[in-house]
Amino acid sequence: MEVYDYRQELIDLLNNTADDPQSLLQTQRSLTTILNILNHYQESTPVKQDAPRFVQRKIQTANELPPQARKTLKSLLTGPTSVKETPGSTVTLSASTSAPKTITEEERLAADNRYLVHRKLSGAEINHRYYPEAILHALPFPVEDGDIAQLDYEQKVRGLPVIRRITGDHLSDYTPEKINVIEYGELKRVPGSDVLQLSKTIKGNSIVDEAPANTIVIDPFKYPGRDIKPGMVIDFAYYDHGNGLADAKDGSIRWIHEKQDYDTTKQPAKPKVVKKPTNPRHDYEKKLDYDLHQRKVLVITGIRSKVKGLKPVVDKHHGLFRGLDASAEEKVSSSKLKREIRDADFVIVCIDAIHHRISQLANHHAKRYEKPLAIANITSNTAVERAIARALNGDPAYAESSEDLKNYK
């Protein structure tokens, strides 16, 4: 009986078999086909029981199979011509070869709980949360559009993270909206109608105070629930697009002041004029000994006549004097203070003749830009010199009442 040697074909078939179900099923079918083919040709050959004869027989090979069987066997033994690429491998390759993500300015600031302020006509949006004007009004520092606010998530006010401070950061790709605010405006009724108008302010320093024709019409029905009435004192905000009061028609009431707040707008009483002695002694030059090394000292005072007179104090200690006249409170804006303080090395505030708003803004901007600040209770050479010494040494901003000049010798 002749038996076809099919071992090598089986070895090749098994070597081309993968471990996935599809390949195993294909191999199983191939084995079945091979067995059927072998059985078919084995049964067609008659088995003779006669005495053996020495006859040379032709050995069966795969080439003796029918063409269709050879084609089927070849395809089964060699396996699939291409390997199907699974979606998972493609995704892994794409993820591994992708470029690293670039960290944006906002993401870098957010890592330290600092976020961009989107100031509105009333309130502000910080980190996708709306802060009402009541929260912003209670802060000891102003909040403008484009500022960077640092939030404290450990403390909450009205369910919102507390605004800890306004940092000195700014986003390079963000242009702040220009918002004009008319502060402490008095509402009056328009004769013969239900609407109100804003034609002057208590401070007298806004655009409506420049001419009688400059008025802003306010419809009380636009603010339901706020009971807008004549005689109220308000802050009115509008976006400045360069069209003057024409832009104010799309404005909104930002804040309604209580009556006890009105006195905050009054100018401080002018200091009494002290008669100078006939022979003034400038002993301030020899009482303190320190060197400013050409650093800039900004002195803010409300007595215009003494601004230049304070220059010798700074010159004596080899510093650069910068004086800021704050006698007219309405002419000293927050941006002007910010610019002067940012360019100085030390800030001295003479509080005897300036508005408290200026001293608060000076303190805020000095902290914001990390500038040493000291307070002089009066505008005098000695008080300013002692204040500079405290700022230079990192001492408290205010002098103790019992402070003696001998401590600075």
Image (spheres, rainbow, N blue to C red):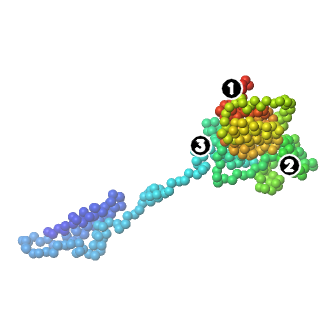
Mark seen at residue 208: 2
Dot 1: what SS? helix
Of 72 and 151, the residue lying toward us: 151
| Amino acid type shown at disc 3 | Asp
Q: Is residue 74 above or below residue 359?
A: below
Q: Is residue 86 left or right of residue 336?
A: left
Tell me the number on the disc at residue 112.
Answer: 3
Q: Which residue is located at x 79 percent, y 47 percent? A: 181
Q: Which corner quadrant of the image does residue 165 belong to?
A: top right
| Total numbered badges shown on the rendered structure | 3
Mark 3 or 1, nearer chain start: 3
Is residue 348 at least partly visible in the picture?
A: no
| Residue 41 in sight here | yes
Q: If you read the primary sequence from the N terminus, does the residue marked by circle 2 or circle 1 appear first?
A: 2
- Disc 1 marks a residue whose amino acid type is Asn
Of the residues tagged 2 and 1, which is closer to the observer?
Answer: 1
